[in-house]
Structures are given as C-alpha cells and as structure tokens.
C-alpha cells in the first residue's frame, strides 16, 4: 500500500527502502527554518503538509544515523526511518505538544529499532543452529598488531570501527541509552522519557554500559570518548544526584 505525504510516496512492505528526501520545489526560508518543532507539527496537524517536509529535512539524517547505529544495516535503518515518519504523519491529528517533538520522534524510533534488533537476533539464532560450526561469525574483535606500521587514516578507521562494534555488542537498551546520550547529546530527562524509565534507572543503565565499554575499549589505550574515566564518573555522579 502507498501513502502519499508531502515528502513523496511512502510504501508499506516494500523491500527496497525509498529515499527520504524533500521535493525540489520546497523552499527553506529563514522564517520556516526558525520555526520550532512544535510550531511545525501543529501546522501539520492543521493540514499544512509543507511543514512536514521541514521536519523531514531537519531530522532525516540524525534519525537514520541513530537507527543505523542501532541495527547496523543501512537498508533496515532507512526502512525504519521511513516507518517512523509515517507513524508521525499518521498521528498528526492526535498530536499535542505535551513533550518535546524529539522525545516523541526518538521514542518511536527506539521502539522500532529494539523490536528489529530482537527479531533479527532470533533469526540469526535460528540460522546458526543449522549452520556449520565454523566459528566465523563468532570471531573475537581484534585490533591491528601494534608493531604494524599502517597509514594513520587506516588506524583511525579501525579504531572507529572497534568502538562501533563495542557499542553494538551492548545489550540493546544500553546501546540505545548510550547512543542517545553520547551521539544525540540528549539529557537524562529526555532519554528517560524515550526509554520509558525513571532517571535513576537510566543513570544506572548508562553506568553499566560505560563500565562495559571502558573494559572493552581498554586495548585502544589512551582515553577514547566512550570509555574515558570522565564518562563513567559523570554517570556515577549523576546516580548520586
């Protein structure tokens, strides 16, 4: 089934994700770009579909990036982002500015991502039971040998990939909390609303996640942004506040 939105055709059940792009005819005036998310969503509720295009343009990239870090698959991330915006558009008539728009948006995205991760995990488990036990998929993460002299860009690429895989290895709810906290730079209150938990529970969740990352990223040496003592200390202090 196809859904016609201001930003184009959204297709349900299409295995090939559509590009979430804004029509060429949409003009981004200074006035439009400075309108708040709430103002734009209220305009969408009133029937102004062009305001939905502004929201799409504003949040498409951060949403797809967040979803990709959650599911580690570009196509799935695009599909989930499409579903998020579709759900937002469908719910436009019931929209009330009782919370930040980003809280609502990322709560939908997080729930979809968690469901996708869990579904895929069960699928992988089913496949692995029938697959040869060659251990290929379960190979431990290894850094390039220290003695090898590699171009600096390759070292940074491997370092970044190592951090990404460490974050990916976290339990899915911890992973979502870390991504929202460190990558989306949301505060505790907003993340707690997205994950539907108390702030104290969130801080405990983050503390456990950062402690795990600190250990896993120790081979990198130095103080990686996600594993530094300051991060764990920040969360620890937050727990006692």
Image (cartoon, rainbow, N blue to C red):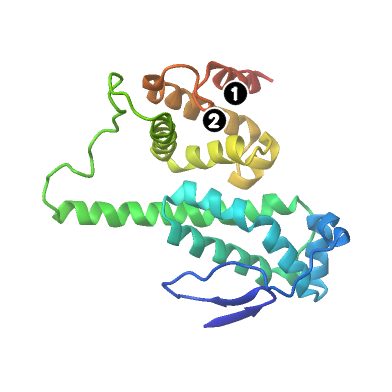
Element type where label 1 sits in the image:
helix
The residue lying at 41 percent from left, 24 percent from top is: 217
Side of 144 relative to 95 (left or right): left
In the rendered image, the vertical position of residue 40 relative to residue 235, given as above or below = below
Q: Which residue is mark 2?
A: 206
Q: Position of residue 110 (x, y in %)?
A: 55, 51
Residue positioned most to the bottom? 1
Residue positioned most to the right? 31
Residue 107 shows in this picture: no
Please tell me the numbered disc located at residue 235: 1
In the rendered image, the vertical position of residue 157 relative to residue 214, given as above or below = below
Task: Please tell me in which quadrant of the rendered image residue 148 appears.
Answer: top left
Element type where label 2 sits in the image:
helix
- Dot 2 crowding, Cα within 10 Å, few <14, some 14–19, many 20+: many
Residue 2 shows in this picture: yes
Confirm or deny contact between disc 1 and disc 2 (CB under 8 A). Answer: yes
Task: Please tell me in which quadrant of the rendered image residue 239 appears.
Answer: top right
- Dot 1 crowding, Cα within 10 Å, few <14, some 14–19, many 20+: many
Could you tell me how far apart the alpha carbons at marks 1 and 2 are, in whole angstroms? 7 Å
């Amino acid at each position: 089934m196809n859904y016609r939105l201001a930003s184009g055709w959204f297709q349900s059940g299409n295995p090939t994700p559509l590009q979430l792009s804004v029509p060429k005819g949409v003009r981004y005036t200074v006035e439009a770009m400075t309108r708040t998310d709430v103002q734009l969503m209220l305009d969408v509720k009133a029937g102004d579909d062009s305001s939905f295009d502004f929201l799409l343009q504003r949040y498409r990239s951060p949403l797809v990036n967040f979803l990709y870090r959650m599911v580690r698959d570009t196509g799935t991330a695009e599909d989930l982002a499409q579903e998020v915006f579709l759900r937002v558009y469908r719910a436009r008539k019931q929209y009330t500015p009782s919370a930040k728009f980003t809280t609502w948006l990322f709560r939908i995205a997080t729930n979809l991502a968690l469901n996708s991760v869990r579904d895929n995990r069960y699928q992988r488990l089913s496949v692995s039971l029938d697959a040869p036990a060659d251990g290929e998929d379960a190979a431990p993460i290894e850094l390039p040998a220290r003695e090898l002299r590699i171009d600096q860009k390759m070292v940074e690429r491997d370092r970044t990939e190592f951090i990404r895989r460490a974050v990916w290895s976290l339990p899915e709810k911890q992973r979502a909390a870390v991504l929202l906290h460190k990558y989306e730079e949301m505060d505790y209150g907003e993340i707690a609303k997205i994950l539907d938990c108390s702030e104290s529970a969130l801080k405990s969740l983050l503390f456990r996640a950062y402690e795990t990352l600190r250990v896993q990223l120790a081979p990198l040496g130095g103080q990686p942004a996600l594993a530094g003592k300051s991060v764990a200390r920040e969360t620890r202090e937050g727990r006692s506040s």
